[in-house]
Image (spheres, rainbow, N blue to C red):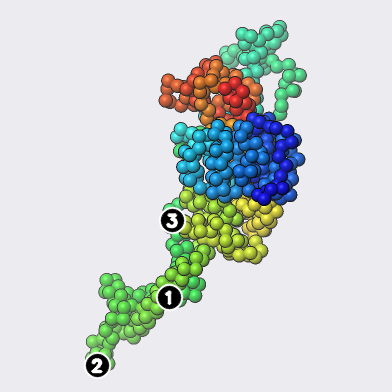
Amino acid sequence: MTSEGWGTPPVEPISQHYVVCGGNALAHRLVLELVEHYEVPVVVLVADRTRDHAPQIEQITGVAAVVEYPNVTEEALRAVSIDTARGLALVEGSDQENIHAALSAQGHNPDIRIVFRMFNQRLGENIERLLRNGAALSGSATAAPAFAAAALGRPNSVEIDGRYLHIAFDDAITADRICVVADHIDRQDLSKIRLLPEQEGDSAQFVRLAREFGDDGPVRPGRLRRAPVPEPAAESEPAVETAAEPEAEAESEPEVAPGGIAALQALRMEPREPISWVRRLRWRVLDTMRFLTSARLRVVLLIALAAVLMAFAVLWYLNRDFGWTVYISLLDLAGAAQPDQQADIAAGTGTGGVWQRVAQVVITICGITFAPVATAIAVEVLGSGRRGLPRNPSAGTRDHVIVVGLGNVGTRVATQLHEMGVPVVCVERDPQARGIAAVRALGIPVVLGDGPFEDQLRRARLKHSRAVIALSGDDATNLEAALEARHGNPDVRVVVRLFDDDFAGHFYRTLDNAASRSVSYLAAPAFAAALMGSEVRGTLSVFRHVLLIAELTVEDGSGLIGLNRHDLEDPGGVRVIAARFARSSHLQWGFADRTRRLAPGDRIVVAATRSGLARLNTVLVEEG
């Protein structure tokens, strides 16, 4: 035991390994990615073997060693053999701690590949310039689009060269789809989903015929038959020759579940949430009133305003002169009106009858109340600002999304929805949560308190909300919030952050109009690919499964040189969706030439599964 920490360094000397620092959910998923898909030796540095996901990480087959140190210190880095490691992933701790650890690791091993998690993306980009071979990623930023899109009931998108790639399901699939990305989709059993199936839906029949009757395929007798001819529109139409598939082959073809197809499609621009400006303006006005006034002040103002309007209507009815009515009403509000004298009334020269004088008195009295009320509003606003109290949602909040939990992910999701123009209300139990200040700066109302979710959701105006997103770090807490939301509003859409896949499967089977996502499941593939040197542009979710959109550059000495589209796609798990060749600046979508071989300077954009992208990275590492 040392003064800085304790642990068991690897028993045998180890080199060319990858180090993962962290014991959280993201570290757990990342270790699984590296061990199962990339098949590389991994050493894990955890703060406590008995906490978080450290016990599960120790049980993963293929982990070379688990070393325990409370902090990523110089001694801890030496204990994990950082000098001979190929890569380092820092996925736990604050931004400052990760920056310090990254710079220390580079001092020990200048050539090591470093990937570190950063919440402040701008700061991360600046730190990348200080590292020879480093990348800063944000797990919350990677996962937030999927949660926001799920709440709005539409797929998230990844921007590539001005086009927005997204996943379309079933009837939403159009003829200009790029490729089929999944089939056998069954909500009752998500394990049946096949990502990037070998044959692409409608084209499967033609591919099978081409292989059977092409130049290289055998042509066996009896393989052609005359197909039954339906009732022809004209008797002169000839019968059509078709290929007869043997019954055995037809039966062996996998059966696609009805309506269980997903395809990758591209849009010229990302669609914004269709919220009319009238609804948005109404919500802003009512919310601003709620922010500036308390309930009692609003009652006083509404009563005074109603009295003024009624008195104004009386004056207008008696005089039939709108301009003069506005003039005298403003004077009465300011207390500057000239009252009728008794002599004037006796002489019949007064300004009006009894009802007109009553109306003027009402307006004057209401005008007297406006000044102190305005002063009270100013004092309350300034006092609230000094106390730093977050806003509560107003009575006018409608069609909003409730975000439960203001951690890193919750803050990102709330911010993204706000930027899309969607009304947002946040719920947070911890008054010290870092996200409260961030969302308050955007004018997003927050409901605080550690009471039951039923009360918090009621204060967040659950009855009028469109969706609830539960984003705390605990699966049970998120499920509790989701069930309370569904109990309070049976029609609300529910999106839940869940780590456990079995838990998520039961969730899908039990609730309709619901979705679950895992932050670590969405982010871990991007971290693993970045650790191997690939550039993942984004992740797309097919229910609980992940599809990666990556852009690969063919460099001198790269294992991709000389490969064609057949070589890249045949082993499965990869689709080449676009290519940009060295001599052209134009990105070619749906590149059809399957025999053209890659040369230095070419760039390809692929849609890949986790294992498919791992295979490409293995080609880059082993042959490059």
Q: Residue at 54% across / 56% down in the picture?
A: 435
Left or right: 343 as drawn, with respect to 55: left
- The residue tagged 2 is 343
Q: Secondary structure at mark 2?
A: helix
- The residue tagged 1 is 376
Q: Residues within 10 Å of mark 1 (few under 14, many from 20)?
A: some
Quadrant location of the C terminus in the rendered image: top right
- The residue tagged 3 is 278
Q: Secondary structure at mark 3?
A: helix
Q: Residue at 27% across / 74% down in the picture?
A: 327
Q: Residues within 10 Å of mark 3 (few under 14, many from 20)?
A: few
Above or below residue 218? Residue 337 is below
Dot 2 amino acid type: Ala
| Label 3 with label 1: CB-CB less than 8 Å | no
Q: Nearer the viewer, mark 3 or mark 1?
A: 1
Cα separation, mark 1 vs mark 2, equals 41 Å
Cα separation, mark 3 vs mark 2, equals 53 Å
Between 563 and 314, the one nearer to me in the picture: 563
Q: Residue at 64% across / 52% down in the picture?
A: 473
